[in-house]
Amino acid sequence: MSSHREAPEIAKDPVADSSDLYAFVSPDRPDSVTVIANYVPLQLPSGGPNFFEFGDDVRYEINIDNDGDGQADVTYRFEFTTEITNPNSFLYNTGPIDSLDSPNWNRRQFYSLTRVADGREHRLAHKLPCPPCNVGPLSTPKYADLARQATYTLSTGERVFAGQRADGFFVDLGAIFDLGTLRPFQQLHVAGKKIFKAEGEPVNATDRMNVHSIALQIPFTKVRRRANRYGVGDRASVIGVWTAASRRQVRVLGDRGAADIPAGPFTQVSRLGNPLFNEVIVPMAQKDVWNSLPPTEDKRFAKFVERPELAALLPALYPDVFPNLDRLNKAKKARADLVAILLTGVPEGLIEGFTNNTGEIQADMLRLNTAIPPNRTPDRFGVLGGDVAGFPNGRRVTDDVVSISLRAIAGLTVPLVDRAFQPDAAAAAVTPGLSAADVTAPFLANFPYLGTPYDGFNNPPADSAA
């Protein structure tokens, strides 16, 4: 999946696990960029009595590089604190929660937001309330209202939200991790030959699960290097985005039930730029190391981008289906197309009217050309579908990043750098068979875009099989 449980150690630490990152020009405010960073993945809605929340001992950061050096020029830092109203109650709430200051809500979470730029820290907000988790229709009867109350417009121009949302990622995990099975292709034929043998309908493994989202809507003037230059080919309009979570290096265990005490400097334990980078590019033995490093160190992993393991597995798993990809692999040619997409951005001239190149520094960042306006009729396949406002130009919440990534790895993007290469017929059709329509909670047209979180009373449905 995009980055849910993508490395051995972070899989044990879900509150610090960055599961998905989105960055796109805001359709409801096209002079701004929206960044959404999801944490605490795979939440079952019925999570009581200890419902999910951000970590008070975790520092969450959204980083923006606007000069192409792989280092953060602007950082938005979120730090959380939790307060218990009634220490003698085991309940999350003792009645309906109808407002963010409801006396019925026993465990409330707040956060501060700091902007770091030019070596200076500026506290933008202090003790902003998060909304509660969506417990059920009696406990949180008007949840959408609570989420609206927890959406703030700051005096500096940013809009911000931090709290529970429905997971918008869609993937057929059971099939993909069963040796790369792609369920919907039992009917796909090439040259009259049935090429995929899997049976059954694809299943969205992350549907009806929640995450905790940090969402920011930031005016262009806060992130661009030079705000007055808007040409599509102008690198000044391109930003690189990644999210990170850090913990204190030392944890002193409390005695006889006393709280643990974090101590020492912060150290990074999780990060995320492009979806699926650590998941399917970085080898198992180096995944935790990758999570601890800044993007400037990603040249160390470039060889895995140039010759991705999955590209070699496809011809082995599906004999005679990817002969051109197989020959490319055996020629041991470095995949310059994937290096451009994932590590440097796409240079001018490869795709008409589009670039999101940030220069020669190889760094895994979600690159977004902010000069490209939102598409009123977005294509789920983004740039591969002719929609240059979508992935890998940033990432929108409805972009089918799994299919796009699989098709790129299968060779569909090789002609960008080698016009003599002919992709295999199957490369343009590879997909797990899911789309945004397979997410039960509807996406929102406005900030914060991800749907209302699933409540514990109705999910799973009462009439579902045991």
Image: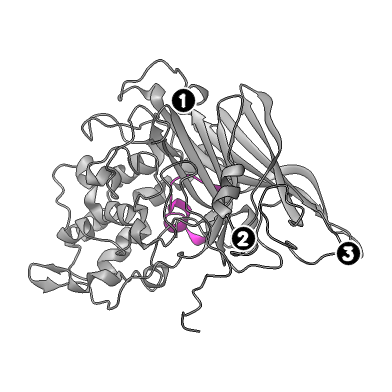
Q: Residue at the spot x=62%, y=60% of the render?
A: 9
Viewer-proximal residue among 399 and 241:
399
Q: Residue at the spot x=58%, y=70% of the render?
A: 457
Q: In the current view of this chain or complex, which residue is farthest to the right?
A: 256
N-terminal of the two: label 3 or label 2?
2
Residue wearing tag 1: 220
Q: Is residue 369 left or right of residue 387?
A: right
Query: What is the quadrant of the N terminus in the image?
Result: bottom left
Numbered disc 1: secondary structure: helix
Front position among marks 1 and 3: 1
Q: Residue at the spot x=20%, y=32% of the render?
A: 352
- Residue 219 screen position, x and y as percent: 49, 26
Q: In the current view of this chain or complex, which residue is farthest to the bottom?
A: 466
Viewer-proximal residue among 305 and 267:
267
Viewer-proximal residue among 79 and 83:
83
Q: Classify 10 Å Cα crowding around label 1: few (below 14), some (14-19), many (20 and above).
A: many
N-terminal of the two: label 1 or label 3?
1
Numbered disc 3: secondary structure: loop
- Magenta highlight range: 270-284
Numbered disc 2: secondary structure: loop
Q: Amino acid at mark 2?
A: Glu
Residue wearing tag 2: 9
Q: CA distance from mark 1 to mark 3?
A: 48 Å
Front position among marks 3 and 2: 3
Q: Amino acid at mark 3?
A: Gly
Residue 68 falls inside the magenta stretch: no
